Amino acid sequence: MTKEQKLQDIAREIESCDACKVGKHGKAVPGEGNANADVFFVGEAPGRTEAETGRPFIGRSGKLLRKMIAEAGLTDSEVYITSPVKYLPDYITPTPKDIEHGKTHFDRQVEIVDPKIIVLLGRVASLAVLNKKISVVAEHGNIIEDNGRKYFITVHPSAALRFKKMKATLEEDFKNLKKLISN
């Protein structure tokens, strides 16, 4: 079975998973991209636009993220984009229980894609993936190595849209990311 087929199997599991849907609504947003991606982007949970379409990061935050990905010299077809929580939470921010369950699917996606670097977009992504609180403001732009993987910490694109200072931070971090992936 190919990596693409394995990821499609996980997507079908997510779509039929009752536990994933508890306290959430909309379509499943399993993730999308290259099954052999070197760079793997992680958000927190789908937004409204994503829950309507089933695609990750295509709303306002997604447009900014995809612009930054392009500026880093990558295309959508070269990366993988997902979140640990696969449905839009009713209360917008995912609960620890949402994250814990979503990771059952998410961790398998990471294992299949086996990227060289995982970009954690914001506090929730960092907490979900690293299982510890990270000060994104203090750690942004840095690589954290954990369990044999490299994680690049940056702010979530939605924060960059709300706060001018965070947009400058995101832009600077993506310049650093470009240098990292071009080595």
Image (cartoon, rainbow, N blue to C red):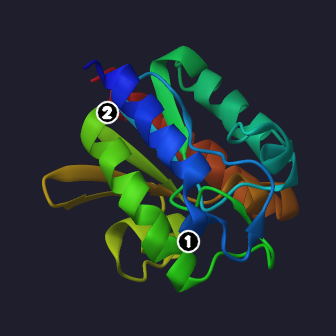
Q: Position of residue 19 (x, y in %)?
A: 55, 70
Dot 2 amino acid type: Val
Dot 1 amino acid type: Val
Which element carries disc 1, helix, strand or loop?
Answer: helix
Label 2 belongs to which residue?
A: 113
Q: Position of residue 142 (x, y in %)?
A: 37, 57
Where the C terminus falls, by quadrant? top left
Say whether disc 2 or disc 1 marks the residue closer to the N-terminus. Answer: 2
**Is residue 36 at all visible to an observer of this figure?**
no
**Is residue 109 at all visible to an observer of this figure?**
yes
Q: Is residue 177 above or below residue 137?
A: above
Residue at left offset 54%, top offset 50%:
14
Q: Position of residue 135 (x, y in %)?
A: 48, 79
Residue 36 as seen in the image, left or right of residue 63: left
Label 1 belongs to which residue?
A: 124
Tell how many labels.
2
Q: Is residue 37 above or below residue 88?
A: above
Residue at left offset 51%, top offset 72%:
99
Q: Which mark is residue 57?
A: none
